[in-house]
Amino acid sequence: MSKIYFDDFEVGQTIELGSCTVTKEEIIEFALKFDPQPFHVNEKEAAETIYGGLIASGWHTGSLFMRLLYDGLLSRAASMGSPGQDEMRWVRPVRPGDTLSARGVIEEKIPSRSKPDRGLVRTTYQVFNQEGLEVMKIRGLGIFAKRPSDDS
């Protein structure tokens, strides 16, 4: 499979990023290390919260999304990193056993004015659970190299 360059992205293009299933053990392990709020680490306490049970940290969901983004796109793209995200929303809780899938829609391509070998790609990404319900939305930028003239 050939490498994906800035030139290959099309505004309106949808990129499917794959899926993964989150376990109770992963939710608790991540939360104990990074976000130890009771509804992420303790099933009994979580049952008494507004969530009615254990849920993944939003940061855990973001990390799972990042893995899907890498496996589904960045691992085969001429990615040069990202200057950041414009928006990140945790729309609904992720629960143990949920299977998450992600996709991105290319919103804009911006050739660099100062560095002609690259450009920015603005993408809106969505993460869905197994019921097709959106659990997270991210809108951000990626930097991608342009296709070298000898790699057409």
Image (tube, rainbow, N blue to C red):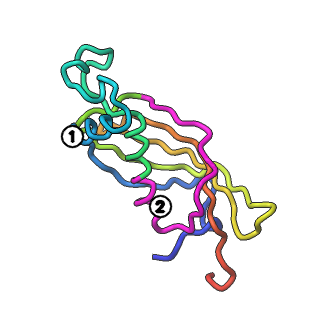
Eye-nearest disc, 2 or 1? 1
The residue positioned 67% from the left and 51% from the top of the image is 108
The residue positioned 59% from the left and 43% from the top of the image is 85
Q: Which residues are magenta?
A: 67-91
**Residue 30 to residue 82: above or below:** above
State which quadrant residue 145 falls in: bottom right
The x and y percentages for residue 11 are 63, 54
The x and y percentages for residue 92 are 39, 28
Amino acid type of the residue tagged 1 in the rendering: Glu
Element type at mark 1 = helix
Residue identified by numbered label 2:
73
Residue identified by numbered label 1:
25
Q: Nearer the viewer, residue 138 or 58?
A: 58
Q: Is residue 112 left or right of residue 131?
A: right
Task: Name the image quarter holding the N terminus.
Answer: bottom left
- Label number found at residue 92: none
Farthest right residue? 113
State which quadrant residue 79 falls in: bottom right
The residue positioned 29% from the left and 15% from the top of the image is 49
Amino acid type of the residue tagged 2 in the rendering: Leu
The answer to if 17 sits in the magenta stretch is no
State which quadrant residue 7 falls in: bottom right
Graded by Cα atoms within 10 Å as few (under 14), some (14 to 19) or many (20 or more), the crowding at tag 1 reads: few
**Residue 131 to residue 76: above or below:** above
Element type at mark 2 = loop
Q: Is residue 74 left or right of residue 145?
A: left
